[in-house]
Amino acid sequence: MPYFNSALNTLIADLGGVNSATWRKTAVYVSSEFGRTLRQNAPVDTGPGTEHGYGNISALFSGGLSGSQGAFLGGEPS
């Protein structure tokens, strides 16, 4: 996840930051072709990662979404 976090933060900065009008009009949708756990493993030779999970995940990031920051719709997975 560190690579994804860095890329998303760079995109937001390039769009003018979290309070910019451009970020409020931008949506980033991320989907995995297979499930992954949310908890990160200890770093391995290729870098930190996650285990295979039981279902896939989807995430939507945008400055224009309303609601609680970091909320899980339908409940947080275990």
Image (cartoon, rainbow, N blue to C red):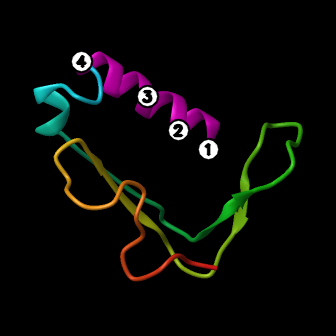
Lower sequence index among marks 4 and 1: 1
Q: Are marks 3 and 2 in contact (CB under 8 Å)?
A: no
Query: Of circles 4 and 1, which is in front?
Result: 4
Residue under pointer 2:
4
Query: Mark 3: which amino acid?
Result: Asn
Compute the Cα span from label 1 to label 2.
5 Å
Q: Position of residue 50 (x, y in %)?
A: 71, 57
Left or right of 41? Residue 22 is: left
The residue lying at 52 percent from left, 76 percent from top is: 76
- Asked if residue 10 is among those painted magenta in the image, a careful observer would answer yes
Q: Pointer 1 and pointer 2: residues touching (CB < 8 Å)?
A: yes
Comes first in the chain, label 4 or label 2? 2
Q: Amino acid at mark 4?
A: Gly
Give SS at disc 1: loop
Q: Position of residue 35 (x, y in %)?
A: 57, 71
Q: Which residue is mark 3?
A: 9
SS class of the residue under badge 4? loop
Mark 1, residues whose alpha carbon is within 10 Å: few (<14), some, or many (≥20)? few
Residue at left 36%, top 75%?
73
Q: Position of residue 19 (x, y in %)?
A: 22, 28
What span is in magenta? 1-15
Q: CA distance from mark 4 to mark 1?
A: 23 Å
Instruction: Pick out the residue farthest to the front.
Output: 68
Amino acid type assigned to the residue bearing label 2 in the image: Phe
| Identity of the residue drawn at 24% across and 18% down | 16
Name the residue that disc number 4 marks. Answer: 16
- Residue 52's place in the image compared with 63, above or below, is below
Which quadrant is home to the C terminus? bottom right
Q: CA distance from mark 4 to mark 3?
A: 11 Å
Predominant SS along the magenta part: helix
With respect to residue 54, does 68 lie above or below? above
User: Around disc 3, counting alpha carbons within 10 Å, would you say few (fewer than 14), some (14 to 19), or many (20 or more)?
Assistant: some
